[in-house]
Image: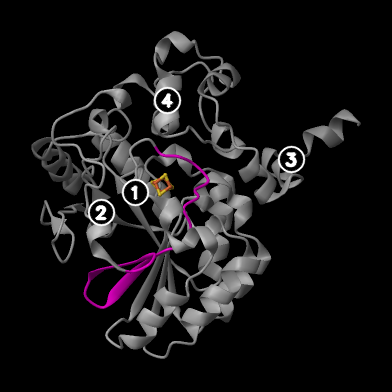
Amino acid sequence: MPKSLSNSISPLDAESHFGWQQQLAQAITDPLQLLEMLAIDALHFPQCQQASEDFQLKVPQHYINKIEPGNPHDPLLKQVMASAPEVRAVTGFERDPVGDLAAMAAPGLLHKYQGRVLLVTTGACAVHCRYCFRRHFPYSQQPAARNNWQDALDYIRRDSSIHEVILSGGDPLVLSNGKLTPLLLAINDIPHVEQLRLHTRLPVMIPQRIDDSLLNLLKSLRLQTCMVIHANHAAEIADDEIDVLHKLRAAGITLLNQSVLLKGINDSTGALNQLSKRLYHAGVLPYYLHLLDRVEGAAHFEVNEADAIALMQQLRQELPGYLLPRLVREIQGKKSKIPVFEL
Ligand code: SF4
């Protein structure tokens, strides 16, 4: 290939040749392989293989491309790299910290909050975030594993107080358009449902997932549709991500971001300030900043409440109100997220 031609192919073009599903299938799952690819000495991550046995490491190539080689402290790497603190038991950290299993109203359907339900669309994700509050969720026992949402859809049809359906998981966008289409059309046909919300890391993990067919599907719905993209750091949102987020906006999708306050990753006003500004540049509004859900294996990511409030106080001096996320905590059994800091 002539040099000039090879130089004209961007990393995203090169990844597109493989398609998003192939990228998903070829995600790296071996911690030592990931470290080798990034030229990072395994001594920085003792017991990484043991931690990955409990909750398997999984990172797609596109995301790896955004991690700084040779830097064991990279904030993107820390979100996905299995590490020794995960295998230490810490008092107060549980397997189901937000009470998902108690809120199961129908197989695969959580009904915690008035007027809205959450459908566990699939157990699969494009990435395994080490802080995930569902890292111990028994996905294999849910109907999502069999793509059978009939009971959940019947429950929604029967309850006319449900106005919003939230697709979560796992990550709903790991489903093919072929699987997603009948589900979305069935929800679209329920007259009392007005809003659809998708919680997904795919625009940040594998932006090629936002293909024309998905955009056309979302555009065809009568539902007001919102996508919450779950970015935690500005470096996750590069030019490729901005392109697809702009396409989603152009398709009439409201874009919000929800992040988790994570020690050593985004627990500084500088990181949070840059994240809000980068999101806005991409057409996304910061929505929630969550205190960590106290899930077993993630204690080392926790930022205490007093430090979190101090960060928000400083951030309030620096950013306009519309770029300040709401600092919240989820408490088991409560009917809404609990604000920790009033703007
Ligand atoms: S993408 Fe979401 S559900 Fe999946 S591992 Fe990450 S935080 Fe958990």
Q: Position of residue 74 (x, y in %)?
A: 42, 25
Eye-nearest disc, 2 or 1: 2
Secondary element at tag 1? helix
The range drawn in magenta is 106-129
Figure check: 105 above or below 47 = below
Is residue 200 rendered magenta in the image?
no
Gap between marks 2 and 4, in whole Å?
Answer: 23 Å
Q: In this figure, which residue is indicated by the disc labeled 3?
A: 14
**Could you tell which of marks 2 and 3 lies nearer the N-terminus?**
3
**Residue name at image x 30 percent, y 45 percent:** 133
For marks 1 and 3, give the CA distance. Answer: 29 Å
Percent across and percent down for residue 113 are: 22, 70
Three-letter amino acid code of the residue under disc 1: Ser
Q: Is residue 119 magenta?
A: yes
Label placed on residue 74: 4
Q: 292 left or right of 199?
A: left
User: Which residue lies most toward the front here?
Assistant: 141
Q: Which residue is mark 2?
A: 325
For the point 40% across and 74% down, the residue is 152
Within 10 Å of disc 4 (Cα), the crowding (few <14, some 14-19, many 20+) is: some
Identified at 62% across, 61% down, the residue is: 176
The one of 39 and 312 positioned closer to us in this rendering: 39
Q: Amino acid at mark 4?
A: Asp
Q: Which mark is residue 276?
A: 1
